[in-house]
Amino acid sequence: MELLMGARALGRVLACAACVATAGCERVVDVDIPAPEPRLVVEGRIERIKEAPSGRQRIRLSTTAGFFDNRLPPPATGASVIVVDGSGLVFPFPEVEPGLYEAENLFANVGETYTLILEYQGDTYEASALLHDVPPIDSLYFEFEEESLIIEEAGFRAAIDFVDPAGVENYYLWEQLVDGVNEIPPDPQNNLNLVSKDEFYDGRDVTGFQPSDEVAIQPGQHAEIRQIALSRLAYDYYYALFEQNALGTGNPFSFPPANVRGNVTNLDRPYKYAFGLFEAAEVSVAEGVAPPR
């Protein structure tokens, strides 16, 4: 009897669906989705630029917005932010503009552990990261590609050569800036070419690698590629983030469809952890101007 009733119910559902499909009826349904309590989002990386070390470091704080909110994430203002190195030296990060916290005298070192401690709206958050070294980019050059079935836009692509260190697990993130704009298209392939582990090229020469092969660079445009050392945790984070953000807005620190857990813990209320990631990394930078066609 239950099986019969289930079949009849299913039949009614299918009949209704068929009616809607054939009649082309549309009904607007308003669904009230309660706004979640905003969470802190941390975008912080202590960097050592291999070619030109600098003491300038930045940490950006924002808060999560609703899933259907197209606005930029609101800045988290009024936080108290410090970073402590392995020897106990404390570096304050005063707020220089809404949500942006900056230090001018933190010269980072490979092998050092850095700990972020911040207070925001009554909660204390903490995260630590070890600064890994990165192999240098040996050269940057441009390769022209014509429009085709697989190339959407004709133009130059920036390519790099480097040598991966042998016998060491290395994890990478690449950032490409064109005329100062960080190009991170919201494409699922980003978790295959903008982040990488050296499982299949350990100790080998890497030549002609194009981190952002979807981005066409026109003659005269300035391109910069940043090769960034990642920890295994940071690699897993970026891989998941790029994969989820394929359905999002293209902002790698916007609220994702599902929670991508970083490493920033809430010491007062552990269940209300922050989103985002605090990391430390050596960075190799190469740049150039696309030649005339």
Image (cartoon, rainbow, N blue to C red):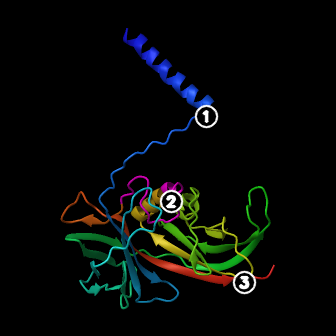
**Magenta stretch holds residue 190:** no
Residue 256 is a magenta residue: yes
Q: Secondary structure at mark 1?
A: loop
Element at label 2: helix
- Amino acid type at image mark 2: Phe
Quarter of the image for residue 4 reads: top left
Residue 243 x %, y %: 51, 55
Task: Give neighbour class at mark 1: few <14, some 14-19, many 20+ (Cα, 10 Å).
Answer: few
Label 3 neighbour load within 10 Å: few <14, some 14-19, many 20+: few
Which span is picked out in magenta? 243-261
Q: Look at the picture and state if 47 lies above or below 52.
A: above
Front disc: 1 or 3 = 1
- Three-letter amino acid code of the residue under disc 1: Gly
For label 1, the residue is 24
Q: CA distance from mark 2 to mark 3?
A: 29 Å
Residue type at the position of mark 3: Gly
The front one of 69 and 137 is 69
Q: Point out residue 119 in the picture as x, y percentages from the top left corner.
A: 23, 74
Mark 3, secondary structure of its residue: loop
Q: Which mark is residue 242?
A: 2
- Going from N to C along the chain, the mark reached first, 1 or 2, is 1
Judge whether 114 appears above or below 190 on screen.
below
| Residue 220 image label | 3
